[in-house]
Amino acid sequence: MNKVIRFLPLILFVLLGILLFRGLSLDPNAMPSALEGKKFPQFSLTELQQQSKVLTTADFQPGIKLVNVWATWCPGCKYEHPFLLKIANDKRFALYGVNYKDERGEALKWLQQYKNPYQFTMFDGEGKLGMDLGVYGAPETFIVDHNNQIRKRFAGILDEVVWQQQFEPLLKQLQQEYQDSQANTQG
Amino acid sequence: MNMQIIQRLLTPISSFFIALFMAFSINAAPVDTYEFPDPVTKKRFQQLVYELRCPKCQNQNLADSNSMIAVDLRKQVYDMLIDGRSDMEIVNFMVERYGDYVLYRPKVSAATYLLWFGPIGFIVIGGIVIALFVRQSKEQSQPLSDEQKQQLNEILKD
């Protein structure tokens, strides 16, 4: 008993050390998304290019969707844009844009100047959809599966490394899930 | 007028100005121009923005931050209050979108048991350790035998 007590401080110290050391490697910016696993929020927003056209979740194509939140005031979005153009032709998913808290004129100019990677862009001038998506900055990218369920939220700039590490594996998995669900409905 | 007098005068004057500037620099929080129908709603608003954490900034609450998202969320809190929603509904609205991260007062859940009850646990552990030590030292201290008392007296005589 005496010996155990003598070593107790050392044991506690080591345990505390392990706990704190682990804390060092945690990213304080990483914020668990509250929306992963939930349905994509309902929205009713005008299209960026065509103010008279109202878009809802019904306008999404079936299958996998990537929803990218961007704005002209966001430097990271400009940096990310060439990569979005690169993945825009990927047939596995449809890429949609949410123009978040922006000026319509500025955003239109942006898409003309830098080319448009999106199937369509929802104009969210007030940031209402952004708030429902839990967006706290731009750029952010969401992966939405064929059931309109949000499967991933990525806050930050998309690039090749992030894509290979975090998006590719999930896309493969979702593609499989989509194919399985189609096979089930047919069979 | 010689230099010494000037220097003697300068010290209280400069400390006065330092104190003055410090007094004014404390209040740097952003000011919104919201109008409240009654003082209770105002109080609730202040309490909510004080306890909700700004999602963009790590160590600031909504009340302190001037980031775009904090401004938006303050407005959201205000709109919901005016709309007649309860504090609970507003907090849930935020948690649904931004997760438990936005709560400066974490919920009691399996993930936060350690946080909430850890301190109590430490007090209990500390109490047990102290009790063990006290008991041990009691057991070890035996009364002196007559022989030992005599020896002690002889040593103290010198």
Image: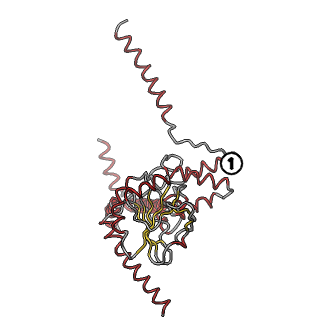
A30 with respect to A45 (left or right): left
Q: In the picture, residue A15 is in which quadrant?
A: bottom left
Percent across and percent down for residue A40 are 52, 70
Relative to B15, is A88 above or below?
below
Q: Quadrant of residue A69?
A: bottom left
Q: Residue at x 49, y 50 (%)?
A: B68
In which quadrant of the rendered image does the C terminus of chain B lie?
Answer: top left
User: Where B24 sits versus B150, above or below?
Assistant: above
Residue B141 is situated, as x and y percent measured from the top left of the image, at 38, 58
Single out the residue that lies furthest toward the top: B1
Crowdedness of circle 1 by 10 Å Cα count: few (<14), some, many (20+)?
Answer: few
Mark 1 residue type: Val
Q: Which residue is mark 1?
A: B40
Under circle 1, the secondary element is helix
Give the x, y percent position of residue B124: 47, 62
Quadrant of the drawing holding the N terminus of chain B: top left
Q: How is the image coloured?
A: secondary structure
Report the residue at 44% width, 68% height from top.
A119
Q: How far across and how far down the image is residue A183, in percent?
A: 45, 89
Residue in the image at 41% along x and 55% along y? A110
* Chain designation of label 1: B
Say whether residue B99 is visible: no
Quadrant of res B81 = bottom right
Residue B16 shows in this picture: yes
In the image, is residue A89 above or below residue B21?
Answer: below
How many numbered discs? 1
Hey, which residue is sitting farthest right in the picture? Answer: B38
Q: Is A115 or A5 nearer to us in this picture?
A: A115
Of residues B109 and B54, the one drawn nearer to the viewer in this rendering:
B54
Q: Nearer the viewer, residue A26 or A160?
A: A160
